[in-house]
Structure formats: structure tokens, C-alpha cells
Amino acid sequence: MSYLHNFPFSSLKIDRSFINRLDGQDGLELVRTIATLARNLGMNIVAEGVENQKQWLQLQALGCEFGQGYLFSKPLDPANIATLLRNTNESEALQRLAANLEAETTAASPSTASIE
């Protein structure tokens, strides 16, 4: 863990196995701890496997700006995701995510750490 801040990651992805346990107090506290770590390191937080509005509201309350899962869309390839987000008049966060996705698909190096 002491070397985590030395890696060139800009985002931290929380695995769906943690998101699925948000209903329990232990699961919520674990995700809160992961989110706090990411924020303290200046990273974006991406939640994987968000399936319902309750999960998404809990994650937003913890400072999570980005999510993946069936709540938002069925799985899509990168080109279709960018198109979907460009054509969606939802929040500014979605527009930023579309821009980040387009930038990441053209970049050669990964910029996301994953907690699994």
C-alpha cells in the first residue's frame, strides 16, 4: 500500500464484489475506506457493477463520480459508449466521462488501478 501513490494512476475502480455488499454495514464501511483512500490520493473513483439506484446514491454520497453497470447501460464497446454519452443530455459528469473515455481509448498506457 505504501507504494500506491507512486503509480501513475488517475482513477481507482472498485470491483463489483464490493459494490454488491453495500447493503451490509461492513460492506459500506469497506467501500467508504476505499473511496477515502482514492480521494486522499487525488484519484477519480469508478464503481463497477452498479445495478440499482440505491447503490448509486450510496456511492455518490461517498464521493464516487463514475459508475459502470446495468443501471446505466448494458455492456457496450468503447465506440458505442462514447456515442451514447455524447447523445445523452444528463449530467456534466457523463460528458466528462465521455471525454475521458475517448482520451483513454486513444492513449497507449492504462490509467486506472483496480481494487479486486
Image (cartoon, rainbow, N blue to C red):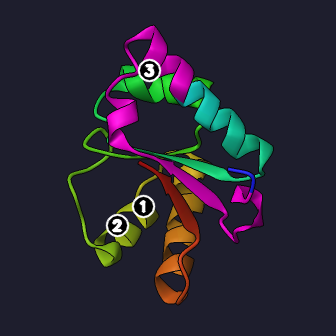
Picture layout, residue 105 above or below residue 25: below
Q: What is the C-alpha distance between the residues marked 3 and 1?
A: 30 Å
Magenta segment boundaries in residue numbering:
3-30
- Dot 2: what SS? helix
**Viewer-side residue, 93 vs 58:** 58
Q: Amino acid at mark 1?
A: Leu
Asked if marks 1 and 2 touch (Cβ < 8 Å), the reply is yes
- Left/right placement of residue 14 relative to residue 3 reads left
Tell me residue 30's x, y (percent): 53, 25
Residue 5 quadrant: bottom right
The residue identified by callout 3 is 27
Question: Which kind of residue does numbered mark 3 sit on?
Answer: Gly
- Does 105 appear above or below 99? below
Above or below, 71 against 109 in this view is above
Q: What is the x, y in percent for residue 77?
A: 26, 72
The verdict on residue 5 being magenta is yes
Question: Disc 1 versus disc 2: distance between alpha carbons?
Answer: 6 Å
In the rendered view, tell whether residue 61 sits above or below residue 109. above
- Per the image, label 1 sits on a secondary structure element best described as helix
Q: Measuring 50% from the left and 88% from the top, which residue is drawn there?
A: 106
Crowd band around label 3 with a 10 angstrom C-alpha radius: few (<14), some (14–19), many (20+): some
Query: Which residue in the protein does label 2 denote?
Result: 81
The tag earlier along the polypeptide, 3 or 1, is: 3
Q: Outermost residue toward the front?
A: 2
Read off the residue under disc 1.
85
